[in-house]
Image (spheres, rainbow, N blue to C red):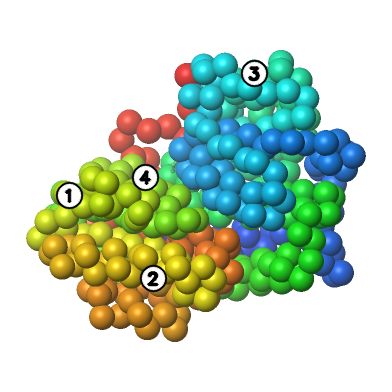
């Protein structure tokens, strides 16, 4: 059942190109416009929306953080994203013009379910992004966009995350389409890139051996830090979460721009720091700022593990280890940048003798608050 892999997690990491392609399947027509049949909230209702609020937990929350960048950039609708467990108890401001998006692989996470119930009580429309057909969260939502990742068995979420990202991009693009915002060449180009992204994920998977080898050399470390900015920030958080839950190591993700506001004090001799570098072609300001962050932490002794786009030569002098990912539009980069972090955490867990598919103290779905 593990299809020749030692762990379900390895199998599920390998299934990501197909999972991503399946989630896109039938949703983009040849002319490049989107049809999301399951989103049973009418275009006229979607045109009335004045705020999007995303609620989720754990890895799904990281997908939501990335979705915020895409939704605000492509639709110009204000978007908030909040941990479901926090949202629910702080009396959030919602009404009939708010669209609440609940993201959940299992569809059974109690905090997310409670958040969506609260949203519906305030008269908001709820759209679920979910991987499990017929589970509670989609049943209680106004509409659902299923991720087609197939069953995810390993406790640590991998393919569900990538497909949640794809679903979030589809929703963002669809909102842009029905509202007519920014629906121009940029969006058409993104849709084209999205429809090819599964091949890029495949290419990343083919180059993971050095990442595994690197992970094995770090098995006796206590701490690994992760830095990113813009959509690379949630990717850094996701890399840190994977490492905590699988390798039981102290791992923290930071927004690179925050370094000087505290975290840089953690940098000491030989501490591994993984840095997710934005594309130099898109927002080159962000790219340049991160390159100077890498310089700064390296000057203080950090062992820099740099994830950067192919052709980005600026990072080379400061990277102790360089992990290449294919060039993608800025907003889509998490689909390729997360994969090495999954492989890294899985290999470190194995090297430390941990149970990969069933990390201690964790359950696949958290059905209590
Ligand atoms: C991390 C992980 C958890 C889940 C979280 C939400 O690898 O699996 O953080 O992402 O418990 O679960 P769902 O998506 O089922 O609501």
Q: Quadrant of residue 245?
A: top left
Residue at the image position 66 percent from the left and 71 percent from the top = 193
Element type at mark 2: helix
Q: Quadrant of residue 53?
A: top right
Q: What distance separates the C-alpha of mark 4 from that of mark 3?
A: 27 Å
Left or right, 339 with respect to 146, comes to: left
The residue pinned by badge 2 equals: 288
The residue pinned by badge 1 equals: 266
Relative height, residue 293 to residue 315 (above, below): above
Q: What distance separates the C-alpha of mark 2 from that of mark 1?
A: 22 Å
Q: Nearer the viewer, residue 82 or 183?
A: 183
Disc 4 vs disc 3: Cβ atoms closer than 8 Å? no
Q: What distance separates the C-alpha of mark 2 from that of mark 4?
A: 26 Å
Residue 241 tag number: 4
Q: Is mark 4 within 8 Å of ligand 1?
A: yes
Left or right, 222 with respect to 328, comes to: left
Image spot of residue 136 (x, y percent): 66, 26
Image spot of residue 29 (x, y percent): 84, 64
Q: Earlier in the sequence, mark 2 or mark 3?
A: 3
Disc 4 vs disc 1: Cβ atoms closer than 8 Å? no
Q: Earlier in the sequence, mark 4 or mark 1?
A: 4
Q: Nearer the viewer, residue 237 or 136?
A: 237
Element type at mark 1: helix
The mark closer to the camera, 2 or 4, is 2
Image spot of residue 205 (x, y percent): 47, 70
For label 1, the crowd category at 10 Å Cα-Cα, with few meaning under 14, some 14 to 19 and many 20 or more, is: some
Q: Is residue 147 visible?
A: yes
Disc 2 vs disc 4: Cβ atoms closer than 8 Å? no
Q: What distance separates the C-alpha of mark 4 from that of mark 1?
A: 18 Å
Q: What distance separates the C-alpha of mark 1 from that of mark 3?
A: 40 Å
The mark closer to the camera, 4 or 1, is 1
The residue pinned by badge 3 equals: 118
């Amino acid at each position: 059942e593990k299809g020749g892999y030692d762990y379900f997690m390895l199998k599920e990491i390998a299934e990501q190109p197909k999972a991503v392609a399946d989630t896109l399947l039938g949703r983009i027509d040849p002319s490049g416009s989107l049809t999301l049949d399951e989103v049973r909230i009418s275009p006229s209702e979607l045109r009335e929306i004045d705020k999007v609020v995303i609620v989720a937990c754990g890895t799904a929350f990281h997908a939501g953080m990335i979705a915020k960048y895409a939704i605000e950039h492509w639709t110009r609708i204000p978007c908030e994203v909040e941990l479901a467990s926090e949202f629910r108890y702080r009396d959030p401001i919602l009404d009939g013009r708010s669209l609440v998006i609940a993201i959940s692989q299992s569809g059974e996470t109690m905090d997310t379910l409670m958040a969506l119930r609260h949203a519906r009580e305030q008269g908001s429309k709820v759209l679920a992004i979910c991987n499990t057909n017929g589970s509670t969260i989609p049943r209680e939502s106004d509409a659902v966009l299923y991720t087609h990742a197939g069953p995810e068995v390993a406790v640590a979420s991998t393919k569900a995350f990538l497909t949640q990202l794809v679903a979030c991009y589809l929703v963002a693009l669809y909102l842009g389409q029905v509202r007519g915002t920014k629906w121009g060449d940029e969006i058409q180009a993104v849709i084209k890139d999205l429809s090819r992204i599964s091949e890029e994920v495949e290419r990343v998977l083919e180059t993971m051996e050095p990442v595994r080898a690197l992970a094995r050399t770090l098995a006796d470390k206590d701490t690994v830090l992760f830095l990113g900015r813009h959509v690379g920030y949630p990717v850094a958080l996701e890399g840190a979460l994977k490492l905590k839950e699988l390798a039981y190591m102290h791992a923290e993700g930071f927004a690179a721009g925050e370094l000087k506001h505290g975290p840089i004090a953690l940098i000491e001799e030989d501490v591994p720091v993984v840095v997710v570098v934005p594309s130099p072609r898109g927002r080159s300001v962000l790219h340049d700022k991160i390159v100077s962050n890498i310089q700064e932490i390296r000057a203080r002794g950090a062992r820099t593990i740099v994830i950067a786009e192919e052709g980005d030569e600026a990072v080379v002098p400061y990277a102790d280890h360089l992990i290449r990912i294919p060039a993608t539009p800025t907003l889509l980069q998490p689909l390729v940048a997360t994969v090495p972090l999954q492989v890294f955490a899985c290999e470190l867990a194995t090297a430390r003798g941990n149970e990969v598919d069933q990390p201690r103290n964790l359950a696949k779905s958290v059905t209590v608050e």
